[in-house]
Amino acid sequence: MSGLIIGVPVTIADANIEAFSVPENEYPQWDPGETYDLGEYVIVTGTDIHQIWRSVANSNTGNNPLDEVDLDNPSKWALDGATNAYKMFDQYISTLTQQAGSISFTLKGLGQVNTFGFFGLKGDTLTMTIRDEDGTFISTETRELVSYATFNSEYDWFFTPFLSIDFMVFKDIPPYFNARYEITVTGAQCAIGAVVPAYGYEFNSINRNSTNTPKDYSIKTEKTPGVFEFVKGPSALESELELTFPNQQIDLLNRLVKQQFSLPTLVIGNDEYESFTHYGNVYECPNSLPYANEGSTRLKVESLF
């Protein structure tokens, strides 16, 4: 694949995860017979439930965190997010599964997948081995999490600092039904923010009029005249991807956009430019058929954080 790809992510449930190397032990499991004080943390796990909760009351006994009705104004337990092991499956890039040395896991039963994205990466290498449903070896590939984008001369190889890569995309994966994917990240300190298996639909490559716009969600508040409070917030990248496409793809494009509108989507704009690859929300796609055999659009997508 070399053109723009709109990838429909596959939902990852407990039944799809095996051989996981990251434990869920950062806090004790919630115990209905235990009394918790204000500020204590517990873990609640079950089928497709892997959560951290914080007590917002003293003498907190016998109150199941999962019974909290109003998560915005909790009375006993406040949801703190996913456990460390499952942060990479929570659809946020900035919440990281972290572990020293390596992170390894195997995914199975995902249906048809031809594209795989990893975001929020930290480490030295990422290896993905693919086997069919019966365990027969298909392929393996190891990639360094180092960018050579600043290396333009022999001098750079010796004196220019390496830049880390925080995302990696594997494309043209043989779409074996229910293949098994063995993933390992290695390094002194490893992290994965989001794991995105997807089935990608390819269109023409984006053209030179495509744009990127950084968006800052920090908050600046004027407390008193001339005195400001600044709260650092997340940042995102908003892209407008301009492309043309064969007229027969207009229905496919519109179905994909309608289906994925405001949902996490894997969008790969161009092999040549990393900046146009997103795990984000598609929110606009005006398109037209100005020519006899060719349509055009400016697909708008904002990366998640």
Image (cartoon, helix red, strand yellow):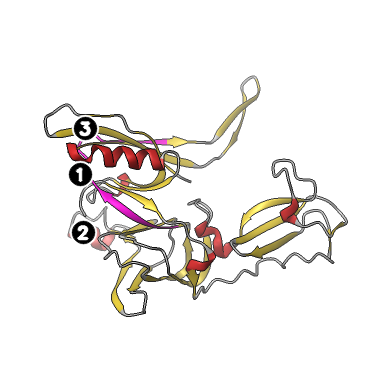
Q: Is mark 2 on a helix, strand or loop?
A: helix
- Which circle's residue, 1 or 2, is located before the other in the chain? 2
Q: Tag 2: residue type?
A: Tyr
In contact (CB < 8 Å): disc 2 and disc 3: no
- State the residue position of label 2: 155
Residue 205 tag number: 1
Label 1's element?
loop
How far apart, in angstroms, are the residues tagged by discs 1 and 2?
A: 33 Å
Please determine whether, in this image, residue 189 is positioned above or below residue 37.
below
**Residue 200 percent coordinates (x, y):** 30, 53
Task: Say whether residue 120 is magenta.
Answer: no
**The magenta segment:** 195-214
How crowded pointer 3 is (Cα within 10 Å; few <14, some 14-19, many 20+) is rated as some
Image check: 284 left or right of 73? left
Amino acid type shown at disc 3: Ser
Q: Which comes sooner in the sequence, label 2 or label 3?
A: 2
Please name the predominant secondary structure of the magenta segment in the image: strand
Give the amino acid type for the residue marked by disc 1 in the picture.
Ser
Residue 74 versus residue 66 in the image, above or below: above
Q: Which of marks 3 and 1 is in front?
A: 3
- Calculate the distance from the C-alpha at mark 3 to the C-alpha at mark 1: 12 Å
At 29% from the left and 57% from the top, the residue drawn is 160
Query: What numbered label is drawn on residue 220?
Result: none
Between marks 2 and 3, how big is the CA–CA gap?
43 Å
Look at discs 2 and 3 and give the one toward the viewer.
Answer: 3
Mark 1 vs mark 2: give the one in front.
1
Label ID, residue 296: 3
